[in-house]
Image (cartoon, rainbow, N blue to C red):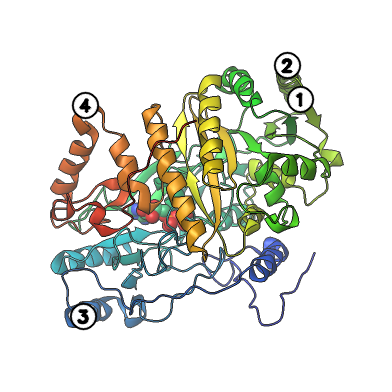
Amino acid sequence: MPTSLEKGIALPPLLSQSHSGVPERLLSDSIQAKNRLWANKKTHAKTNKELPILPENISKEEFYNAIAELQGKLGSDNAKVVDTPLDDGWYLEHPNTHDAMHILEDDDLVASAVICPGSTSEVQTVVLWANKYRIPIYPISIGRNFGYGGAAPRLNGGVIVDLGKRMNKILDINPQDCTCLVEPGVTYFALFEEVQARGYQHLMVDVPDLGGGSVVGNALDRGVGYTPYGDHWATHSGLEVVLPNGEVSNLGIVTKMGVTLMPHPGDHEGFAYTFQKESDIAQLAEIIRPLRIAMILENVAQIRHVSVVLAANGKPRSAYYKGKGQIPSDILHEAASKEAFGDCTWIYYGMTYGPKNIRQWKLDLVHKEFMKVPGARQLDPKTLPRDDYFWVRDSVANGVPDINEINWVNWYPNGAHLAFSPIAPVRGTDALKLWEMASSYGNAHGLDLFPAFLVGLREMHLIVEIPYDRNDAEHRLAARKCLEHLINEAAKNGYGEYRTHLVFMDQVANTYSWNNNALMRFNERIKDALDPNGILAPGKSGVWPARFRGRNNAGIGKLEKAPSLKL
Ligand code: ADP
């Protein structure tokens, strides 16, 4: 494993240097990831439009005056116009100015300015300022919401309020109550390291796939982790919020959040099974449902497609296949057969917690059920090399945040990804229908897919990451069209997305149209009452304030109507 960067590439920031840095224990992995990404980066992003891209209805002069007014209140370093060339960076050195994984042109979804308040009262100041000038503001905590828009504003020229840069304190960790209180800029990396440093090894932090996201932002966007406390929204314990009119209440910009921490169960044991056929997903969903509801399967159940496991092990697509269109399934099978985990279509990654006798009782039950699927194989972790993806899953399910999930982003040059994220009941028929839908649309658009089924206590997320080369306009368009078609087709079959990229927020919101759009009418009523000037995150989740309503997606991300594909 390389421990130094190629010539001319800067070291990734450490947590000791920056709130969004990486802990020292992951420096070597981060260096390796950065070397790979740089080797895979063919051209750099550039914008054609003149910067700054201004919010609408404000002249350049007025805008600069408004920013100068704010600089007078927050300090000139804390309110900056975005007027220098955009840099996409990478996961650990991500921009807070735009979507680093642009799916539109690289001058769409770009901020006019970035503001970094240092306290709740400064957030109130920013909100009052935005009301005075009618400037749309978009709060981010860290801005690593990759695949869903990153740090970008929904409206081109919106102002980003980067809360994490200066509000990143862990205000409290209570070892008796197993709770903590954090500001927006606290990442999973930071919280985990602090819990360890304070000697609270009896507390477990629930962490998502990558540890660089914020605890606050992930919960607000309904992210999940992989310990028994995986539902982040369900396990938060109170919020402090600045309202769009500047008051502190409970609907607006989150400035503090309480989080419950699980008492660490002590011992743990990762396990994995492989399944041969695509259609096995139907039987698996039926097997998993009762085991999950009874918490025999204790953490979020994960069934990952072999494509993502191969990509996560670090090699780019070109190592397996150089052709156009979707990578053929026999190539994936052949590649899998050369890996320690062997030929398969799906891999289940699980974890049991607690003393040996309790673990064994659950493992035996799981084994008996999983082996009912013809062709199922149990993997012996001892036979898997240290760089196998199994160990990433093992670490995350043990509450230790990791960085190596980033490797699959490298599948294509200039790696980027977009996610199709429907939720469904935990049923075999639903799992199979969604899988067939995703794979046939992916195939029709010539796209490789990285699907994973994630099963909570009463629902199943299918997350299909669609990787693409962000500097290839044709590839970007195919990914957009594929996702647009999938959202439509899923809606026709009764499935909605739990989360989506900025560009698809209107489309997804429109699919929740029951009872003459009762939900949207309700959301709009609340929006107008709380945000009469329409300054806070206009268009977020498809909810537009009155002044922007009915403008055809406000001119951004409008795609032509999707034709129906025959499945
Ligand atoms: P991450 O911490 O994973 O990088 P982001 O900071 O990108 O996540 O936040 C994800 C989304 O959640 C943002 O686009 C924004 O819509 C919302 N969000 C994040 N932080 C806040 C906050 N403090 N208050 C209100 N909304 C927020």
The residue at label 2 has a CB less than 8 Å from ligand 1:
no
x 26%, y 32%: residue? 513
Q: Which amino acid type is marked by label 1?
A: Ala
Residue closest to the eye, 139 or 104: 104
Q: Position of residue 104 (x, y in %)?
A: 40, 61
Q: Earlier in the sequence, mark 3 or mark 4?
A: 3
Q: Quadrant of the N terminus?
A: bottom right
x 66%, y 82%: residue? 8
**Left-right relation of 330 to 434:** right
Q: Which amino acid type is marked by label 4?
A: Asn
Q: Earlier in the sequence, mark 3 or mark 2?
A: 3
Q: Which amino acid type is marked by label 3?
A: Lys
Q: Classify 424 as above or below 183.
A: above
Q: Position of residue 157 (x, y in %)?
A: 29, 68
**Left-right relation of 78 to 177:** left
Quarter of the rendered image showing ligand 1: bottom left
Measured Cα–Cα span from mark 3 to mark 1: 64 Å
Residue pointed to by mark 3: 60
Measured Cα–Cα span from mark 3 to mark 2: 67 Å
- Which residue sits furthest right? 383
One can see residue 427 in this view: no
Residue pointed to by mark 4: 515
Q: Secondary structure at mark 4?
A: helix
In this rendering, the count of numbered labels is: 4
Residue 110 image-quadrant placement: bottom left
Residue closest to the eye, 407 or 26: 407
Residue pointed to by mark 1: 376
Q: Secondary structure at mark 3?
A: helix
